[in-house]
Amino acid sequence: MKRLLSILFMVITMLCTQAQEKVTFRLAPEFNKPLKYEMVTKMDIEGPQTVIMDMLMHMDMTYSSFEDSLVNIAAKYSYVKVDVDAGMMTASYDSSKEPLTEIEKIFATQFKPIIENTLTYTMNKLGHIKNIDFPNVSDQIFDKSSVSSFGTTYPNYSISIGDSWNAESKIEQLNVIAKSTFKLAEKTAQGYKIESTVNLEDATGKSVGTTTGYFVVDAKTFTTVSSSTITSVEMQGAKIKTTTELNMVK
């Protein structure tokens, strides 16, 4: 019994020590080393027209050197697969196959710029994203706010397991303010798990949607290993639910 109590005390002590350890989150990626990601997005639209869309994308992301305390990031999409169910009509597109039907040719024309061009943006050491540019790609095809699923925003001070912090940003495409609360939940075998809750507000301060989920970031580079987010938005008479899963592929 004494030995068992001794072991339990040691375990409790170790857990308490881990919870009290301070971590300073600062982006420190390996430069010019492509990281491969797979992103799965599912969108459900409830409105005058109900639409379900599933999208699978493969992407290579590369970090380049700091300039004025910013990291330059380039993301190149190599593969896109889309399935759309609009009730009476269904359609699919696979970028690895030659388009045969008219609808496939339309999809191919729309998604061609995504594959042929490179998405670039900058990020400071705390994860604040700026200067998003995706040349020749329309906002209807690519939502720039989705770049936020690639990473999280860090506090400018050291934190411990269980600590929370806030951040605020503007999503230009939707014309809303994103007010975020993050929490350092735990340290896993993959890295640090950060839970997030985001409230989306319009210009009047009214809530138009929420995003909940988590990010897992590497314990050394603090770059994203995986993430999972669910966004629910109600705008212009339609309810839109978007689920996004991002995973690094070895």
Image (cartoon, rainbow, N blue to C red):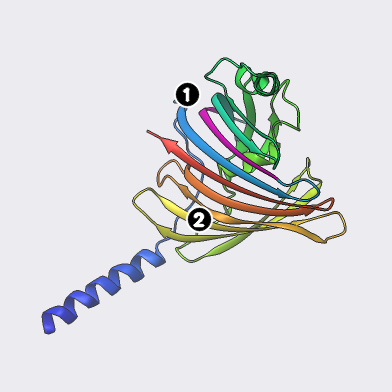
Query: Label 2's element?
Result: strand
| Magenta highlight range | 51-65
User: Label 2: few (<14), some or many (≥20) within 10 Å?
Assistant: many
Q: Which residue lies furthest to the bottom in this view?
A: 1
- The amino acid type found where label 2 is placed reads Ile
Indicate left or right for 182 with 241 as reference: left
Query: Disc 1 to disc 2, how far (Cα)?
Result: 26 Å
Please indicate, yes or no, whether residue 71 appears anywhere in the rendered image. no
Return the disc, 1 or 2, that comes first in the chain's sequence: 1
Q: Position of residue 73 (x, y in %)?
A: 58, 29
In the image, residue 208 sits, relative to residue 242, either above or below, namely below
State the residue at coordinates (52%, 65%): 163
Residue identifier under label 2:
194
Indicate left or right for 155 with 132 as reference: left
Q: Which residue lies furthest to the front in this view?
A: 88
Task: Give the image quarter of residue 133.
Answer: top right
- Of 182 and 123, nearer the camera is 182
Please indicate, yes or no, whether residue 105 appears anywhere in the rendered image. yes
State the residue at coordinates (61%, 17%): 99
Q: Point out the image quarter for the N terminus.
A: bottom left
Task: Give the image quarter of residue 41.
Answer: top right
Label 1–label 2 contact, CB within 8 A = no
Q: Position of residue 61 (x, y in %)?
A: 52, 29
- The amino acid type found where label 1 is placed reads Asn
Residue 64 colored magenta?
Answer: yes
Q: Point out the image quarter for the C terminus.
A: top left
Indicate left or right for 80 with 113 as reference: left
Residue identifier under label 1:
32
Chief SS of the magenta region: strand
Residue mark closest to the camera, 1 vs 2? 2
Query: Label 1's element?
Result: loop
Q: Position of residue 34 (x, y in %)?
A: 46, 26
